[in-house]
C-alpha cells in the first residue's frame, strides 16, 4: 500500500498586501474554498520546469503575467477559443491531466461591461492594441459586438488586431492610426482605454477629444490603479456612463476561480478587499 509523501516548501512570497493575492484569498475565504493563491516569481529560463512542478504538485491551475503570457503556450496541451485567437494566455487550467490555456482578461472586461450594457450589436472603440486591447477586442467581438474600431499608434499592431477580428469573428473591424487627438465617432456605443496611459498617474490623459465623449456613450478604462482616471473623470463630467479597471480586474479573477474550482465567487467581496489593499474608497 502506497502513501503520499509531502514536500513542504519555504519560499519568499509577496507581502500580504499584494492586491491580487489579497483579492483572490478573500474570495476563497468567503466561498469556504479550501485553497490558497500564492504568487511566485519565475524567470523565463525556468518557465518549463515551473509548469512541470505545478503539474506534479497537483495545482488546479495558475495565472501568468508578462513576459510569460505568450511563451507559456508552448508548454500547454490545448487552448480555449479566445486564448487561441488572442494568442496569449493569462490563466492555465488543469483538466483531466491536461493543462489548458485560457485568457480571462477579455472575459473579465465583457463581464464587467455586461453589468452596464450588453455588447451585442454595439460599436466598440478600443484605444490600444497591446495585450489588454487584443483581449478586449476579441472577447467583445465573440460576445456579439457588431463593429470593433481599433485605434493605436503602432500601425502594424493595430492593423493586425483589426484583421484578426474581422477574419476570425462575426464582427466588422477597422483600424484608425492614432496620429493626432482622436475624435470618438457618433456611431460608437462604447469607448475603452486599453492603453497603459493613466497607470499610477491620476492626471495622465489619453489623447482623445473630450468634447466627443457624449452622454450616450459608455466610457471604460482598463487602468485599475488609480481607478478614477483623468479620462473617466472627464467622461463623467460630460454625463457619460463610466466603467473603471477594477471591475475588469475583479471579473478576470472571478472567472479564473470559476475555471479552477467550479464555484462562482462573490465579486463584491473581491472588489471590497481589492479597494482596501489599494487604499481606495470601495464606493468609487
Ligand atoms: P502592452 O504593453 O501590451 O500595450 C500597451 C498599449 O498601450 C499599446 O497599444 C501602446 O501603443 C499603448 N500606449 C502606451 N502608451 C501610450 C500613449 N502615450 N499613447 C497612446 N497609446 C499608448 O500593455 P497591456 O495591453 O498588457 O496593458 C495595458 C494596460 O492594461 C496596463 O496599464 C495594464 O495595467 C492594464 N490591464 C488591466 C487589466 C485589468 O484587469 N484591469 C488586465 C490587463 C491589463 P503602441 O502599440 O502604439 O505602442
Image (cartoon, grey):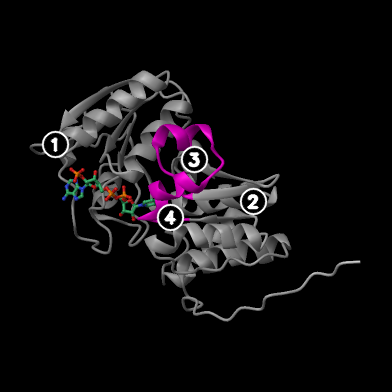
Q: Does any atom of ligand 1 lie closer than 8 Å to the CB of label 3?
A: no
Upstream in the sequence, badge 4 or badge 1?
1
Report the disc number at residue 260: 2
Residue under label 1, please give it: 178
Q: Is mark 1 within 8 Å of ligand 1?
A: yes
**C-alpha span from label 4 to label 2:** 21 Å
Given residues 129 and 123, the one toward you in this image is 129
Q: Is residue 94 left or right of residue 226?
A: right
Q: Residues within 10 Å of mark 2 (few under 14, many from 20)?
A: some
Is 67 magenta? The answer is: yes
Residue at position x 51%, y 49% from top? 91
- In the image, the segment drawn in magenta is 64-90
Task: Identify the residue at the far right of this view.
Answer: 1
Image quadrant where one finds the C terminus: bottom left
The label number, if any, that marks residue 81 in the structure image = none
**Precedes in sequence: disc 2 or disc 1:** 1
- Please tell me which residue is depicted at 71% across the width and 44% down the height of the picture: 96
Residue 141, percent across and down?
A: 42, 27
* Residue linked to disc 3: 107
Label tally: 4
Mark 3 or 4: in front is 3
Task: Specify the label residue 246 is tagged with.
Answer: 4
Q: Residue furthest front?
A: 1
Question: Residue drawn 33% across and 62% down?
Answer: 226
Circle 2/circle 1 CB separation < 8 Å = no
Q: Secondary structure at mark 1?
A: loop
**Is label 3 in a helix, a strand or a loop?**
helix
In the image, the residue with mark 4 has its CB under 8 Å from the nearest atom of ligand 1: yes
Amino acid at each position: 500500500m502506497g502513501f503520499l509523501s509531502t514536500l513542504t516548501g519555504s519560499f519568499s512570497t509577496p507581502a500580504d498586501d499584494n492586491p491580487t493575492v489579497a483579492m483572490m484569498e478573500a474570495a476563497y475565504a468567503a466561498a469556504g474554498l479550501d485553497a490558497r493563491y500564492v504568487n511566485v516569481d519565475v524567470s523565463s529560463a525556468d518557465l518549463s520546469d515551473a509548469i512541470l512542478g505545478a503539474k506534479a504538485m497537483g495545482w488546479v491551475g495558475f495565472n501568468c503575467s508578462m513576459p510569460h503570457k505568450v511563451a507559456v503556450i508552448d508548454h500547454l496541451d490545448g487552448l480555449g477559443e479566445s486564448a487561441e485567437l488572442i494568442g496569449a494566455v493569462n490563466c492555465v487550467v488543469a483538466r483531466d491531466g491536461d493543462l489548458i490555456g485560457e485568457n480571462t482578461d477579455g472575459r473579465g472586461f465583457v463581464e464587467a461591461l455586461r453589468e452596464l450594457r450588453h455588447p451585442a450589436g454595439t460599436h466598440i472603440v478600443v484605444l490600444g492594441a497591446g495585450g489588454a486591447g487584443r483581449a478586449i477586442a476579441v472577447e467583445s467581438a465573440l460576445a456579439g459586438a457588431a463593429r470593433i474600431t481599433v485605434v493605436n499608434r503602432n500601425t502594424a499592431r493595430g492593423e493586425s488586431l483589426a484583421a484578426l477580428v474581422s477574419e476570425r469573428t462575426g464582427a466588422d473591424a477597422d483600424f484608425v492610426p492614432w496620429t493626432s487627438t482622436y475624435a470618438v465617432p457618433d456611431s460608437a456605443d462604447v469607448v475603452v482605454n486599453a492603453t497603459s496611459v493613466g497607470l499610477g498617474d491620476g492626471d495622465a490623459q489619453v489623447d482623445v477629444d473630450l468634447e466627443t465623449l457624449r452622454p450616450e456613450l459608455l466610457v471604460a478604462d482598463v487602468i485599475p490603479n488609480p481607478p478614477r482616471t483623468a479620462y473617466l473623470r472627464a467622461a463623467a463630467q460630460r454625463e457619460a456612463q463610466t466603467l473603471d479597471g477594477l471591475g475588469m480586474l475583479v471579473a478576470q479573477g472571478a472567472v479564473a476561480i470559476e475555471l479552477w474550482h467550479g464555484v462562482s465567487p462573490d465579486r463584491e467581496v473581491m472588489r471590497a478587499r481589492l479597494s482596501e489593499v489599494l487604499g481606495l474608497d470601495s464606493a468609487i
